[in-house]
Image (tube, grey):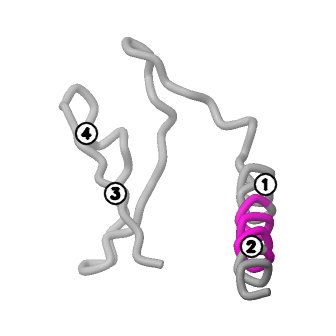
Amino acid sequence: MIRATINFKASRLLATLLILLGLELAMVDSSAAFVRVGEIAQDFTLKNRQTGQLTSLRDFAGKIIFLDMFAYW
């Protein structure tokens, strides 16, 4: 009986994770364009959280940049 309960809980957990994965994939913006090597990236602007100034990607034209996008959830 205990083994059946554990299997049921494991299958519910797996089903929940699969549903969440499906929802996450459904929310992905399929119109997002990927940039290939040699192509020009779309311009975007970000706000500096410390100074409040806006910084645009075009401010770094001709320079190599590294974007580190990290989030705490």
Dot 2 or dot 1: first in sequence order is 2
**What's the CA distance linking mark 3 and mark 1?**
35 Å
What mark, if any, has residue 55 been given in the picture? 3
**Badge 2 element:** helix
Dot 3 or dot 1: first in sequence order is 1
Specify the quadrant of the image occupied by residue 65: top left
Dot 3 or dot 2: first in sequence order is 2
Q: As shown in the figure, which amino acid type bears the numbered disc 3?
A: Thr
Instruction: Identify the residue at the far bottom of this view.
Output: 2
Residue holding disc 4: 60
Q: Nearer the viewer, mark 2 or mark 1?
A: 2
Q: As shown in the figure, which amino acid type bears the numbered disc 4?
A: Phe
Q: Residue 8: image x %, image y %?
A: 80, 76
Q: Residue 73: image x %, image y %?
A: 48, 78
Q: Residue 14: image x %, image y %?
A: 72, 65
Local packing at callout 3 (Cα closer than 10 Å; few below 14, some 14-19, many 20+) is: few
Marks 2 and 4: in contact by CB < 8 Å?
no
Q: Which residues are magenta?
A: 8-18
Q: Residue 11: image x %, image y %?
A: 77, 68
Q: For the point 36% across and 43% down, which residue is it?
A: 57
What mark, if any, has residue 7 been given in the picture? 2
Q: As shown in the figure, which amino acid type bears the numbered disc 1?
A: Gly
Residue holding disc 1: 22
